[in-house]
Each structure stands twice: as C-alpha cells, then as structure tokens.
Image: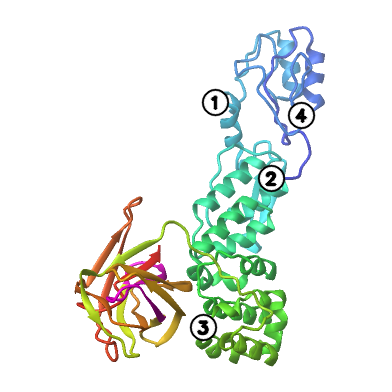
C-alpha cells in the first residue's frame, strides 16, 4: 500500500479513446489538450481519481481520429486536417496487454506508470526513489517473519481487513513456544483477541519453554500480569518465580534503575502478589524466594509458618493450584507379578526413573496390606536425582482392602517431569507388611489409545537406603501421570 499524491495520473498519460469525427478538428484539439493527465471518452465519462481505465479498447483510432492519449492537441489537429490521409501508429497501450484488473494493478507495482507518490528510501548514494500509488495493487500478499508485524500495523492503520486476516493467519501458523510471549504482546497491542487466546494456550501447554525464550523478558507488565493470573500454567511455581525475577531485572534496566531487591519489587508491582508461594515446597521456598530479598521479612515468616504449622495461618498469596492438566489420566505398571510380605521400618522405598517426553506425575499406585483392610500413613516424594531437590511431596494416608490391587496416593499438585532427566520416586510407609511386585521391567511404554503417542519410562536402581526396592522387586509399582 502507498499513500499520498493527488487524483489523476501524472506524466501526460491518458487512456486511448476514439476522437471526434473528421471536420471537428478544433474540438478534438481542445479535448485532447485540456487535461493531459485525465481519461476522457466521447461520452464525457472520466475515470475515478488516481485510476485510468482503457474503457474504449486498444484498437487503432477511428479513421480521421487523433492518436491515443498523450498524443497532444497538435497531433489530433493535424490528423483532422489531413482528413484521414495520414494514419499514425497507435501509442503503446499497456492496459491492452492485461486482460484483468488484477493484472493491471500488478503491473503498476514498483512502476513509474501513473505513480502519484515517491518514497525516498535510504541515505546518500545508497538511497532509492521508489514509485508508488494510492491503492492496493492486488489481493496477493507475501508475508515473512521479518515483515508480518509491520504489515499488520499497516493493515490496521489503513483499515484493510483482508490483509489483516492474512497477517493473523500467518502468525497463527508460525506460533511456537519460543515466540509465544512476543506474539502475545503484539496481539494485545493490535487488539487481536483470537491470536492472544492462541498464544495463551500455547504458553499454558509449553510454559517452561516459553518463559525460557529470549522474548519473555521483553514483555510489558500488563502482559506479565495477564499470564500470572492464569490457573492453567504448566510449571513448578518456583521456576515461575525465577523467571519473574529475570523479568524484573530486565525491567530495572529498561527503567534505568539499579538492579537491587527493592527496585525489583517496585517494578513487579501487582505481579509479585500473583506468584503462588504456598504451592512451593518448603525447600524450594527456603532456597529461593526466602533469600531473594524481594519479599519482606513479615512475608517470609508468614510463609514459613504456612509450610510448618497446622492449622495453617492465612497468607497474603494465592494458594489455589494451577490446574495445568488436559486429556486423560494415564498410568504404567512396572511389575508383572505380585508376591506377599514386604516390611517397613521407617526407610523409604526408592526407584529411579526417566521418561522420553515431558509429563506431569500426579501420584503413585502403592501395594497394601496382606492382613486384610488396613490404614497406612505415607509420605510420597519425587526428587530431582542430580541435585537432590524435592520437586513434589505429600504427607497423607490411604486405606486398603487386603487385596493385591494397588491403591492411589496423590500429590498435592502435578509434578513436572522433563524428558531424559533422572528422577527418584520415594514412598515412606508406616503400617503392616504388604504385597510387593516381582519380575520388574526396566522399560515400560505407554501408548495413547487415541493418538498412538508413546511415553517410554526407564527404571534404574536407586543407590543407598531404598528398603530393598529395585527394578526387579519392591514397592511403587505404578506411576500415575498426564502427558
């Protein structure tokens, strides 16, 4: 699209139309010379401003008539005086070779013909003078990653909904976790709610990748708040806090503030209250937020009390879980046979595992008593093996009926498991002897019945105190998860 300029096509160009009949040379001369930049026909109709149409065809002028447009008054008068004795060659008519309006507009692109505005691009010797016109050349559009946002801005500014739709569709097709935050900012800026919704859904599904992308720290505060308000983010809260701290450091630099805890808290504003600190484990909170300097001493003490005291005191931060799970619950069983008598003396049953794709573990299936209906107390944990960090835990209990079935014990919230990372599943039971599994599998593959997608679990021996649980025998027969 180009803008500016006045109505008729400059440069003495006009559409070729039949001239008045012989003997009316004066009239022909007057008509032809009256406006060298407008289209005229014998019926007096003219083209709309800025456009010229070959309304009268591309044939040679009628006998005795003047030449095509641009021939000038003198040529027309001479032809009339000669009474048709001299036949001029018709002036080249570019429109005659373009059978459709679309082809004619496309021909005008980057062409001096009928141009009514010029853009001077660049500086010095490298500058270019680019001809343009006040109308769109065609409905064909070529959009790339480098031009889509400026094109969308132009489409919005000049109210071209078809071009706007092309841009939005391009953005939808190219939406990825690593550009979701950048596109979300632009979608909010350009008031594109459908695109913004798709960006948020992508961030929900790929929160970890999205917040680690380069564009995350460039978003504005309102966009950050809009994301933190969501209940559907799929990430551990401590990792979300760390990402928000990175954003606050970048924002301090943008505002030319010293990067210190007080200023980080200042630039975060409302966003800080949207971090759900109660969802962290006490270890996560103690190692990170409690030492960041961003929280006040009163807030730190209040949260520590929340983690350690029952009944839990009220805190100023949201304790509602982020329900990031979609689809159907899945589970895998690693044993092929069940036997009797597995004892407990306060030592944790432990098994290491890894998966080939990102999942969320929501609980374990555990064996129950061999002595009939019984209640167990149990603490379950998932530990990041290399760092020995507890990612999720729950102190709870379960009731069993004395059968060899497994009984569900769930975490307070889903635990994110990343691909090809070693984790340790732990269960510390208090209760009578139970059933246990044998003929264990080192690899277990779960295949989705709907999509056919495969999730592969690999189990390894957990060294140290493990109450005898191994790949071959022991407790923790099932892992319950969502993909």
The residue nearer to you, when weighing 221 against 225, is 225
> How packed is label 3: few (under 14 Cα within 10 Å), some, or many (20 or more)?
some
Of badges 1 and 4, the one in the foreground is: 1
Q: Distance between the residues labelled 2 and 4?
A: 23 Å
Work out whether residue 255 can be spotted.
Answer: no
Of badges 3 and 4, the one in the foreground is: 3
Q: Distance between the residues labelled 3 and 4?
A: 82 Å
Q: Where is residue 89 in the image (x, y as percent from the top left)?
A: 60, 20
Q: Position of residue 190 (x, y in %)?
A: 68, 54
Which residues fall within the magenta stretch?
355-379
- Which mark, by number, is residue 36? 4
Q: What residue does disc 1 label?
A: 97
Q: In this view, does 126 lie to the left or right of 189?
A: left
Q: Is residue 133 above or below residue 316?
A: above
Q: How far apart are marks 3 and 2 (CA)?
A: 59 Å
> Quarter of the image holding residue 469?
bottom left
Q: Are marks 3 and 2 in contact (CB under 8 Å)?
A: no
Q: How far apart are marks 1 and 3 (CA)?
A: 75 Å
Q: What residue does disc 2 label?
A: 2
Query: Counting residues from the N terminus, which is met first, the one under dot 2 or under dot 1?
Result: 2
Q: Are marks 2 and 4 in contact (CB under 8 Å)?
A: no
Query: Counting residues from the N terminus, which is met first, the one under dot 1 or under dot 4?
Result: 4
Q: Determine the residue positioned at 25% across, 67% down.
A: 444
Magenta highlight on residue 358: yes
Q: Do the residues labelled 1 and 4 touch (CB within 8 Å)?
A: no
Q: Quadrant of the N terminus?
A: top right
> Quarter of the image holding residue 45?
top right
Q: Determine the residue positioned at 73% across, 12% down.
A: 80
Q: In this view, does 109 lie to the left or right of 432?
A: right
Query: Counting residues from the N terminus, which is met first, the one under dot 2 or under dot 4?
Result: 2
- Which mark, by number, is residue 281? 3
């Amino acid at each position: 699209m180009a803008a500016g300029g006045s109505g008729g096509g400059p440069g003495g160009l006009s559409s070729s139309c039949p001239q008045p009949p012989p003997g009316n040379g004066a009239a022909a001369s007057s008509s032809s010379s009256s406006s060298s930049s407008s289209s005229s026909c014998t019926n007096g109709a003219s083209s709309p401003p800025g456009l010229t149409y070959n309304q009268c065809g591309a044939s040679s002028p009628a006998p005795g008539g003047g030449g095509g447009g641009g021939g000038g008054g003198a040529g027309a008068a001479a032809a009339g005086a000669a009474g048709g004795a001299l036949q001029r060659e018709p002036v080249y008519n570019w429109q005659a070779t373009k059978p459709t309006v679309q082809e004619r507009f496309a021909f005008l692109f980057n062409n001096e013909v009928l141009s009514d505005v010029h853009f001077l691009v660049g500086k010095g010797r490298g500058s270019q003078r680019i001809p343009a016109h006040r109308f769109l050349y065609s409905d064909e559009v070529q959009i790339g990653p480098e031009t889509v946002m400026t094109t969308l801005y132009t489409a919005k500014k000049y109210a071209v909904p078809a071009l706007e739709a092309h841009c939005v569709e391009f953005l939808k097709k190219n939406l990825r976790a690593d550009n979701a935050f950048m596109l979300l900012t632009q979608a909010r800026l350009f008031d594109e709610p459908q695109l913004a919704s798709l960006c948020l859904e992508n961030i929900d599904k790929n929160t970890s990748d999205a917040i680690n992308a380069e564009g995350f720290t460039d978003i504005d505060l309102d966009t950050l708040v809009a994301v933190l308000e969501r209940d559907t983010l799929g990430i551990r809260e401590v990792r979300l806090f760390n990402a928000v701290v990175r954003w606050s450091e970048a924002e301090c630099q943008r505002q030319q503030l010293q990067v210190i805890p007080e200023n980080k808290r200042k630039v975060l504003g409302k966003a800080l209250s949207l971090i759900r600190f109660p969802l962290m484990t006490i270890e996560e909170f103690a190692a990170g937020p409690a030492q960041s300097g961003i929280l006040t001493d009163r807030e730190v003490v209040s949260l520590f009390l929340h983690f350690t005291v029952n009944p839990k005191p009220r805190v100023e931060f949201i304790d509602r879980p982020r329900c990031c799970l979609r689809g159907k619950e899945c589970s895998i069983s690693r044993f092929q046979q069940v036997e009797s008598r597995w004892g407990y003396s306060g030592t944790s049953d432990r098994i290491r595992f890894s998966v080939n794709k990102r999942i969320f573990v929501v609980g374990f299936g555990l064996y129950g008593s061999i002595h009939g209906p019984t209640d167990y107390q149990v603490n379950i944990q998932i530990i990041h093996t290399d760092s020995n960090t507890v990612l999720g835990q729950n102190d709870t209990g379960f009731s069993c009926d004395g059968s060899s079935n497994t009984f569900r014990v769930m975490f307070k919230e889903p635990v994110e498991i990343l691909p090809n990372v070693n984790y340790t599943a732990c269960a510390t039971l208090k209760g009578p002897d139970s059933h246990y599994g044998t003929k264990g599998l080192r690899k277990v593959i779960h295949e989705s019945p709907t999509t056919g997608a495969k999730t592969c679990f690999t189990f390894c021996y957990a060294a140290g105190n493990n109450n005898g649980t191994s790949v071959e025998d022991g407790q923790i027969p099932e892992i319950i998860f969502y993909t």
